[in-house]
Amino acid sequence: MTESPSDSVRQFTVAEDDDSIRLDRWFKRNLPQVGFATVSRWARTGQIRVDGKRAKPEDRLAAGQVLRVPPGGDEPAREPAKPKARALSPEQIAEAKEMVIRETPSAIVLNKPPGLATQGGSKTTKHVDGLLDAFVENERTPRPRLVHRLDKDTSGVLLIARTPGSAASFSKRFASRSARKVYWALVVGKPALSEGVIDAPLAKQPGTGGEKMHIDEENGAAAKTRYRVVDSAGQRAAWVELEPLTGRTHQLRVHMAAIGHPIVGDGKYGGPDAFLTGAVSRKMHLHARRLIITEPKAGEGSGGKLDVTAELPPHFAASMEVLGFDPALSDASPLREETPEKSAEEKKQAARRHFKQARKEERSPRRARGAAAAKPKAKGKPKVKPPAKGAGRKPGKPTR
């Protein structure tokens, strides 16, 4: 924010950090002593101008625009009280810094360990949000803020915004689904289709206080998950890549349990069947492996694509070794937009190959098919569809 030296009418140049912000939100962020009622009155009487034109409180600003603000409106004229940084112990500061895997002018990327909550609650006093004061260097450094969440027992990439402006930009990316998130999971059993899309609406399960979700075909919110089996240990377990195409609470966990392959260690949705015998850990095996998102322009060299990968936690890595899975088989890359466009004939051939493979995997003895056909269709059973023509990689094909 650049202010002119005028003592009467004030002029401000909208900074990159405030790009796309609403006019009333700009005042709340930069001139908090000016109340909303005053901003509305100034806008209504034409005293607020953006590049010389009248503006409404809900209008969005663009970086570089010049905002004209009339004098007054600061009663009482005082600096807004800033929230004091929480005093952290040296151990807490070290814990926060150890999670960092990438830092940019607009973001701090953490590899959240399993068992650490993202935010606090009535019975949760230790959480990532409470450790963010470790990144406040001085009074002028804004406190970093969360822009998305991970379940307490889910590990992996967690994006933290350095400033309010970058938080708004990242939140917009997540809301528009332009951010790409890929998870690794170990699941019980092996899905019949080696890749597909689970389409099953989700809603809060009654009687759980909102702590648990379930499939609700009638009243649930739309939820889709793309999955791909990378490798399997016979029919005992499989290693899958999961890409949420929507962002519902516990979506990946509910969807995998709903198709009969709960995530290993997820007793909440898989019950006793979610645990494997032997040396496989009983902890949750769901890891946010990779995040691809566009950064806001916050300085020289910024504004490009942020592509971050998080290493597996010890228990997950150990279980991969026990089951004989080689991490090199996958780079957790779902970049469909970077896949070269295929010709119409190539798409037809790929579709024929896929459905031929799908029919082969689903084929079973006639007796078993007849028995399955005689059973009534389960209510609320999720739909699992093969991927769209030409989308995704071939099952099990490593990408370097």
Image (cartoon, rainbow, N blue to C red):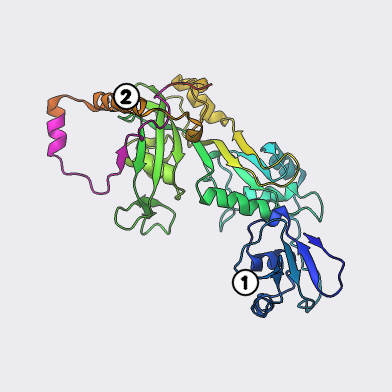
Residue 70 falls left or right of residue 361: right
Q: Where residue 398 appears, x then y in whole percent?
A: 47, 21
Q: Where residue 389 appears, x then y in whole percent?
A: 35, 33
Find the magenta span and give its range.
369-396
- Magenta stretch contains residue 385: yes
Closer to us: 41 or 259: 41
User: Residue under circle 1?
Assistant: 56
Measured along the vertical axis of the image, is residue 376 above or below residue 187? below
User: Residue under circle 2?
Assistant: 349
Image quarter for residue 108? Answer: top right
Magenta segment main secondary structure: loop
Screen quadrant of the N terminus: bottom right
Q: Which label's residue is closer to the chain start, 1 or 2?
A: 1
Q: Amino acid at mark 2?
A: Gln
Residue at 64% over, 46% down: 160
Screen quadrant of the C terminus: top right
Secondary structure at badge 2 equals helix
